[in-house]
Structures are given as C-alpha cells and as structure tokens.
C-alpha cells in the first residue's frame, strides 16, 4: 500500500468496534486499516460477519468506533463531509407509501440539494434507469430490483464526494450489474472514491481496481487484483522427458502434485529453483519450467478460509 | 450544486411529516369518523332538546279533582310539551282509551289516594310532572274545607337557589366538558403518538435512518418530527373543538358556548405544549423498537400513563382536581376544566402552563439522547432503561 496521500482519498486507520461487554464481547472490526483511493473502485470482500457492514457504518458515522479513525483527505471525516457522501445501507428500504420522486427529493433536500435541482437530477437518473414512468408510483409497487435502483439514485444524487455502497450488486441480473458498474465508473472518473462491499468475488475481480479482503474483522489482503495475485505463493510447473517422481527428495522444494513427467512445486528460494533445474537437466530434457500465478479465487480461499 | 439557501433540515422533516400524514388515507378516514362522531353526539343532543313531549291524559267525567290536576299540569308544561285532557264517560271507557292508545294514562282521584294507570307502566317524566300537581290539588281541597287556601299554607315555603362563586356555568356542562377534554386529549395523544412511533420505526427498520443520519443531525430529525406531528395534533384538536362548539351552540347548553370557548382555547394551548413532550416520548419509543411488531411493547408504558391521565382527570374534583391541574400532563385536561367551572384564578393556568412547558423541555432533552442512542442500534428491542442510561 502506497503512503502518498491523494486529494479525496478515503482511509480508515486502526479501526476497532467491539459489540457487547465482558465475556460476550465480539470484536466485529479488529484493527482495520486500508485506503479507498480517489478515482478508484475499491471492492470490499469478505464472508458474512467479516465486518464489512460495521466498517462502512463507521465510515458513515452511524456506528461509533470503539477506537481508530476514519479519514478523508488525510483528516478525520466530519459531519459536513458525510453530508456530501452517497451511502447505500445494507438493508434496502425506503418509505413504502411515498412516491418515488417525492422521497428522493426529500432525501436530496436533507443532503442540502435545493428541491428544483434535486428533482431535475432525479428525473435524469430515473430516465436513464428506465424508471421515468414510475416517478409518481409508490415505492411499494416497484419490484425489488427497481427499488434497488431507486436506492442507488438516493446515493448518487448531488455529485457525492465519496460513495459507500453496501452490496450494491446483490439481486441484480448480469445486464443490470454492468449498467450499475458503468454508473459507478462515471463517479470514479470524476475523481471520487467508491467503496462497495460484495461477497461475489468474481464480480469484484472483474469490476474493481482495488480490493480489500476482510476476514473475522481483520484485513487479510489489500491491493490491486494483479498485485494480490503476484503476492500469492508462486508455484512452478516443471515438465520433463522422464518421470518426475524424484523431485520429492529435493531440498527446498515442496512437491504439490506429481503426475508422470509433470510436477507442480513450491520453491523455498531462488537457489532451490536453480538446484532443481540443474538436477533436471542432468537427468534429461526439460520441456517446461514456468511460474504459475494463482487466480484471485484461489487467493481468496487461501486468505479468507 | 449544494446550496445553503434551502430550508433547514428540521423544517424539511416537519414538512414531510405533515404532507405524509395528510396523504395517509387511513389517517384521513379516522379523522372523518371522529368528526362525524362529535357532530353526531352534538346533533343528538340538539335533536333531543328540540323534542317536545306530548301526553294524552284521560280523566273520568265527574272526577273534578282529576280534571283540575290535569289542567294544571298542562298549564305547567307550557313550551316544554303538550298535555291534552280527554274526558271519558267511565272506568270502562278509560280502559278502552288506554288499550287503543287514544290516551297514555288515566288519572283518577279516590278517597285513599290517587291512581295513575297506563296500559303499560306510565311514563316516568309524566309521573314526575303529575306528582307535585296532585299533591297540590289535594292540599288545596283540604285547605278549602278548613277555611284557608293552599297559597296561605304554602306562603314562605319557597326555596330559591343562589351561587356565590360568580360562575354561571351549569355543573353538568363542566362535567361533560371534563369528559370531552379528557377524551380529546387521550385520542389526540395516543393517535398521534402511535403515528410518530410508527414513522420512526419505519425509518429504523428500513435503515433509511442511516441515510438520513449521515446527512443531517438526528436532533434536527427529531425536532422536525415532533414539530410536524404537534402541528397536526393542534390542527386536529382545533377542528374537533370547532365542530363540538358549533354542535353545542345548537343545544340547550348554548349559554355555555362563550365559557366553553375560553376553556377549549386553554385546552388547545395546554395540549400543544404538552404534546411536544408526548411526541418526543413516542419518538423514543419508536426508536427502541427494531421492527413494527415491537412497537406495542415499547409504547406500552406511554399507553398506560396516558390511560391513567384520562381516567384520573375526567372524574377528578375538589383538592385532587386542583392538584392535577398543576401536575404536568394531567394539567392539560384539569386546568381548562377548572377555568370553565370558574374555580381557577387568572394566574393558575399561567403557572400550570409554565410548569408544563418546563416539563416538556426536560422530556425532549432526555428522549432526544435516547432517540439518538437507540435509533442506530440494530438487532432487537432496546429497553427504556438501557436507552436512558447516561454514557
């Protein structure tokens, strides 16, 4: 993780949240530090109870941290900053018996957007998401997917300075996921940090430029997907002309899998690699000797298991 | 883009609370029912006061005393009703008249006393009317035998009533008013209170409150909710009071309208101030619940207190009433009632109002903290004690 600050970066530092007291106390968020850089989509990944939602709620100021800090531009986030953040909470809900447009205008006004400007912007968003003709409908008459679109509009309006979205893609079909991703990229293009949580790793890997993996309240991996993959334990594939069973006896070499002339090995250091290759050439031809990069899914299993 | 020229957050919340309520069909329906109920009660009393009783009294020919008594009773009724005397030939004709309903009763004098017969039990109000008349006719007859007259015997036996407190309102009206005000208070406080609690838990349950809380201070949200709902409660009570007063003007109690208007005016002021406290407590009760289903439990203490206020105030009199008229919350009902009955000095409602206002401020401060603490706590009901505990 680079230490250079960039204008607009969102950061959490040594964040801790303990629920309950005494023996029943649970450290839901346990010394979490990471950065969601400005202009980047940062994916926040982890299983149920990993602490994603609690961390996001602390960033939005609706949950008090036990200790630690939430920062923007390198200084503590204030109520004024948060007023300009777009937030989508974990559970989906709006006023069921109020018209879509009316309640979006209400939420916009609470965030300081004058009613006419809010109305114009909301109508634009509704148009774009194919909901223009539902503006006057009560929210309860909308399908769940459409309710989610209305909620995302609530977070996106007023050109927010940061977006904190809890599971924004859950329940969307693939086409809707792409539409939503395009929408989010428009905001990163403005130089805004976007932090979203998900438990769908493939989606996060495909969409985001940065990844924070959380497990039991702790950050277990943090970086660009390619960077993380490079950091994972690199294995080597060795293909020989004869049987490769002998690699099992080599010092500094762990044979993960041996199948006839093909061996998958983990090397303790570069010297072990040289020694292995040397021995192999003494015994015959070496058809292949190459590093194997693990997929993100494998890393995720490894770190979040 | 983000202008500061828009309204402050509390005002935006106030507006939404009012608009959302006015658009709520269930609320409007309930309001209509209540207005119809009040108009109906007033209408019933008005109709009843315009009802004139009419009686047909049969007397046997030759029963001079009975004829005299019936005629005197008819004269006494005057505009309150009508009494027609039917002379029938004999006892058999009288029975027939009763059976075929040409007469309601048959009045006859006798050596051992008078008898009033009806085909069924004679009407109570007619019996009440005839009893003193019969007595008077009997005494007058004996007086004549003794060489004197009824007037001479009865001279100096009149009983006049006078009232020294200077009030001029019928105690019946005061009693009715205390019932009506207690009812208005109870309905207004419980009804509007539940609405606030429901709107708070709706926001909490859907996590909308997290979006709102990250945008504006929750203190302002609470202020907007309390204010918006107080405006609604005020408007609602003004509406009920107006319908009630118009109704009252149509009844026999129309003389009480000016005094009643003053009393209702005090009630509206007291209620508005007191409702601020009630609204804040209900908002807190809403914040304690985590789902709509929990509301009944978290608002139960409020319901009990309001029910107690209702029950103690409408029956109270004497010292108890005087004390209640100063104690916050019960003063909302008891002080306007004392103003109506003329029992309160001018300064008393002012002092009671100041006490109530101080109480409201205290309650708002306490419940504001609990509201903020409980509102963002997810998962399960939060206890009153837990929310109120300082940290």
Image: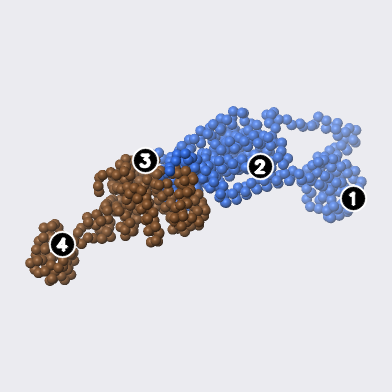
Tell me if B281 is positioned left or right of B389 in this view: right
Helix, strand or loop for disc 4: strand
**Residue B313 in picture, x, y percent from top left:** 59, 39
Q: Residues within 10 Å of mark 1 (few under 14, many from 20)?
A: some
In what quadrant of the picture does the C terminus of chain B appear? top left
Question: Left or right: A264 with respect to B159?
Answer: left
Of residue B390 and residue B279, the one placed in the foreground of this image is B279
Here the colouring is by chain
Chain with colour brown in the figure: A
Residue B244, numbered label = 2
Give the residue at mark 3.
Answer: A78
In the displayed orientation, state which residue is furthest to the left: A282
- Crowd around label 3: few <14 · some 14–19 · many ≥20 (10 Å): few
Instruction: Give the mark nearer the N terminus: 4 vs 3.
Output: 3
Q: Which chain does the residue under circle 2 lie in?
A: B
Badge 1 and badge 4 both on one subunit: no
Q: Quadrant of residue A249?
A: bottom left
**Element type at mark 1:** strand
User: Which element carries disc 2, helix, strand or loop?
Assistant: helix
């Amino acid at each position: 993780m680079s230490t250079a600050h960039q204008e607009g970066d969102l950061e959490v530092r040594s964040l801790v949240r303990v629920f309950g007291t005494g023996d029943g106390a649970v450290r839901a968020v346990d010394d979490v530090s990471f950065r969601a850089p400005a202009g980047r989509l940062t994916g926040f990944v982890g299983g149920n109870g990993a602490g994603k939602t609690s961390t996001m709620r602390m960033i939005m100021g609706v949950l008090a941290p036990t200790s630690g800090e939430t920062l923007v531009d390198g200084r503590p986030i204030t109520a004024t900053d948060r007023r300009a953040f777009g937030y989508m909470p974990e559970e989906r809900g709006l006023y069921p018996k109020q018209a879509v447009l009316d309640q979006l205008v209400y939420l916009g006004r609470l965030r300081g957007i004058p009613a006419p400007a809010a109305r114009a912007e909301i109508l634009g968003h509704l148009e774009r998401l194919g909901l223009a003709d539902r503006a006057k409908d009560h929210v309860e008459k909308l399908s769940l997917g459409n309710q989610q679109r209305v909620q995302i509009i609530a977070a996106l309006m007023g050109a927010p300075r940061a977006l904190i979205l809890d599971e924004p893609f859950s329940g969307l079909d693939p086409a809707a996921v792409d539409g939503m991703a395009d929408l989010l990229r428009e905001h990163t293009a403005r130089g805004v940090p976007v932090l979203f949580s998900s438990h769908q790793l493939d989606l996060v890997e495909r969409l985001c430029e940065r990844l924070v993996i959380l497990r039991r309240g702790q950050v277990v991996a943090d970086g660009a997907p390619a960077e993380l993959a490079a950091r994972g334990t690199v294995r080597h594939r060795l293909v020989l002309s004869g049987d490769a069973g002998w690699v099992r006896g080599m010092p500094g070499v762990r044979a993960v899998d041996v199948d006839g002339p093909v061996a998958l090995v983990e090397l303790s250091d570069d010297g072990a690699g040289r020694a292995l290759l040397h021995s192999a050439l003494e015994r015959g031809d070496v058809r292949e000797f190459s590093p194997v990069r693990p997929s993100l899914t494998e890393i995720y299993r490894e770190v979040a298991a | 883009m983000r202008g500061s020229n828009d309204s402050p957050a509390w005002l935006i919340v106030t507006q939404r609370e009012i608009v959302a309520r006015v658009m709520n069909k269930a609320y409007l329906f309930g309001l209509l029912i209540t207005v119809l109920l009040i108009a109906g009660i007033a209408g019933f009393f008005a109709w009843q006061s315009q009802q004139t009783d009419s009686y047909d009294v049969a007397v046997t020919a030759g029963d001079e005393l009975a004829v005299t008594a019936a005629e005197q009773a008819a004269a006494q009724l005057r505009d309150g009703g009508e009494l027609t005397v039917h002379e029938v030939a004999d006892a058999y004709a009288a029975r027939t008249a009763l059976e075929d309903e040409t007469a309601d009763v048959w009045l006859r004098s006798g050596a051992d006393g008078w008898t009033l017969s009806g085909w069924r039990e004679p009407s109570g109000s007619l019996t009440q009317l005839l009893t003193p008349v019969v007595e008077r006719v009997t005494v007058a007859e004996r007086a004549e035998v003794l060489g004197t007259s009824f007037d001479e015997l009865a001279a100096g036996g009149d009983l006049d009533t006078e009232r020294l407190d200077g009030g001029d309102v019928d105690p019946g009206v005061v009693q009715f008013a205390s019932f009506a005000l207690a009812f208005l208070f109870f309905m207004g406080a419980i009804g509007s209170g539940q609405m606030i609690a429901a709107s708070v838990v709706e926001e909490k349950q859907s996590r909308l409150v997290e979006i709102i809380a990250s945008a504006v201070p929750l203190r302002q949200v609470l202020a907007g909710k309390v204010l918006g709902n107080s405006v609604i409660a005020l408007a609602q009570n003004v509406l009920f009071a107006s319908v009630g007063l118009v109704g009252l003007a149509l009844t026999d109690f129309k003389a009480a309208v000016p005094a009643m208007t003053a009393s209702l005016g005090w009630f509206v002021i007291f209620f508005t101030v007191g409702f601020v406290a009630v609204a804040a407590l209900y908002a807190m009760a809403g914040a304690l619940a985590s789902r709509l289903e929990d509301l009944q439990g978290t608002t139960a203490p409020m319901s009990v207190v309001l029910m107690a206020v209702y029950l103690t105030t409408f029956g109270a009199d004497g010292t108890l009433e005087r004390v209640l008229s100063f104690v916050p919350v019960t003063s909302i009902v008891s002080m306007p009632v004392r103003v109506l009955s003329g029992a309160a000095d001018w300064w008393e409602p002012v002092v009671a109002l100041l006490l109530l206002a101080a109480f409201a401020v205290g309650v708002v401060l306490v419940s504001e903290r609990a509201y903020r603490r409980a509102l963002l706590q997810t998962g399960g009901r939060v206890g009153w004690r837990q929310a109120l505990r300082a940290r």
